Amino acid sequence: MWTLYLSDFKLLSDETTDILLAGIFITNLEQADDVLLISFTPNGAQKKMDALWKWCSINFMIINAIKSLLMILGSIPRLLSVFRFGKDTVTIVKTAKYVGFNLNSTKRNIFEDHYLTKASKARSIAGTLLGLESMVGTLPVWEARKLYMALVDPHLTHGCEVSLDVDPDLLKPLEDVQNDFLRRILGLNKRSMTAPLYTETGLVPLRFRYVKVAGEDSVQLSDEGKASWAMDLRYVIHNLPFNVVLPALSTIPPQMVEAVIKSVDAGLRAYLQWSIDDPNAPKLYLLRGRVEPDKDSEPIQKSLCFRHYLNVVNPKHRKALTRLLLSSHCLALERLRWVEHRRPRIDRNLRVCRFCKVKIESPEHALLECTAAADLVMLRNDFLTRMNNDIRGLPSLNSMSAVDFFTLMISYRHTISLVAKYAFRVTEIFEATPMHIPPLPLHWLIQPQVT
């Protein structure tokens, strides 16, 4: 009703004071009863304020100057004009909120306050969701993912169509909220790598999601080299960790925008897969070459999807398997990589098994190779017997490497709960025995800092 009531409010366009967007001069904006007047000059702003004041007086309304604000974007002149609605002065402010956006005219990025506010709100809501676990128990990953998308993600992505991430320092608090939430629902520690947080849950990292959303909403772009959201989009796309061919922004048709978005999506999947296959990132070797079982076809390799093993009902079993796969476990291969308790990082070849003290204590060794603990051997024999009964034609353990057999075990959907339970029980056996720490030379000891 208010929109209809305001429909006869007209301001004459002035090319010297008005913003030109897609060939149309923008004189004012309305969101319900929130009216925004825009001008490049002080005189133009006052003329529009006078016009609005006159229209209101004719239509039996009074503008509240106390609730009205004026913000100057860009360099502030030494002598400030006085702006009025009628006889009442309007306050000039540095910060304001309009249609949910927190704006700050004195900072290099006018959206900086918006980033910080949304990061704070998103973290608060994420903490509330995770706090539910104290009342209802561990949240299933899929349900936690749905709650995240419904309640947390809207704050993390609010305004990303116009507030493009040209400043990584402002994006980081938002990314931290996303990463921390995913680590928590997966049961991983803060040292875990970030790429698997997305390859395993099927979610898109914020940095790439922003580009896709902004591309979808930026049909009208400028190629004149002037400061604009289109140029920010070009900057952000060119700074992605992969190449995306971006055509001339002034002549780009809608179908080409869709092609750019598809290129970003394909580049994201390739980048995440490269993050796993990167030889300089050995922690994720168990994820290389693995396939995802499909209900209606043969298992295929997928870089980004919600993994079937995350549907394991028992949270302890699910987290045990997830930690082994994503190298966030209690075994020496991972734990001795850390610097802790005045102990330096131990070389990989010295991270030997706490039972046999011969081979490296890795997930595949613990689950499939070590024979130095009787209870471990009995548990493994029982597990392999059940696997052979459930999977017709399962290759023998001796016919392939332990890593390949481990990858094969997790590729079957109908036995994944059995594998997760076995992973949990093996982890329990190893946690019950202290980890083997190799003797360290004196010069390896980390000396305490002198204060």
Image: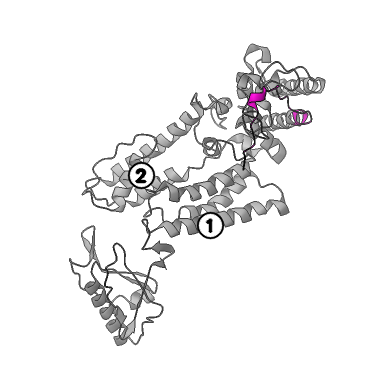
- Residue 440 colored in magenta in the image: yes
Q: On residue 33, which mark appears?
A: none
Q: How is the image coloured?
A: one colour
Stretch of the chain drawn in magenta: 428-449
Q: Which residue lies at the image location 43% right of the left edge and 31% below the top edge?
A: 270
Q: Nearer the viewer, residue 195 or 317?
A: 195
**Residue 238, image x and y in percent?**
33, 40
Q: Amino acid at mark 2?
A: Val
Q: Which residue lies at the image location 27% right of the left edge and 75% below the top edge?
A: 81
Drawn side of residue 104 relative to residue 177, left or right: left
Count of all numbered marks drawn on residues in the image: 2
Q: Is residue 64 above or below residue 224?
A: below
Q: Is residue 215 above or below residue 128?
A: above
Q: What's the CA distance linking mark 1 and mark 2?
A: 24 Å
Q: Amino acid at mark 1?
A: Ser
Q: Quadrant of residue 258?
A: top left
Q: On residue 120, which mark appears?
A: 1
Tell me the quarter of the image containing the C terminus. Answer: top right
Q: Residues within 10 Å of mark 1 (few under 14, many from 20)?
A: some
Q: Secondary structure at mark 1?
A: helix
Q: Quadrant of residue 357?
A: top right
| Residue 314 visible in the snapshot | no
Please tell me whether the stretch drawn in magenta is mainly helix, strand or loop.
Answer: loop
Q: Which residue is mark 2?
A: 236
| Extreme residue in the top direction | 399
Q: Secondary structure at mark 2?
A: helix
Q: Which residue lies at the image location 53% right of the left edge and 47% below the top edge?
A: 176
Drawn side of residue 30 relative to residue 358, left or right: left
For marks 1 and 2 on the same chain, the one whose residue lies earlier in the sequence: 1
- Residue 54 colored in magenta in the image: no
**Residue 31, image x and y in percent?**
38, 69
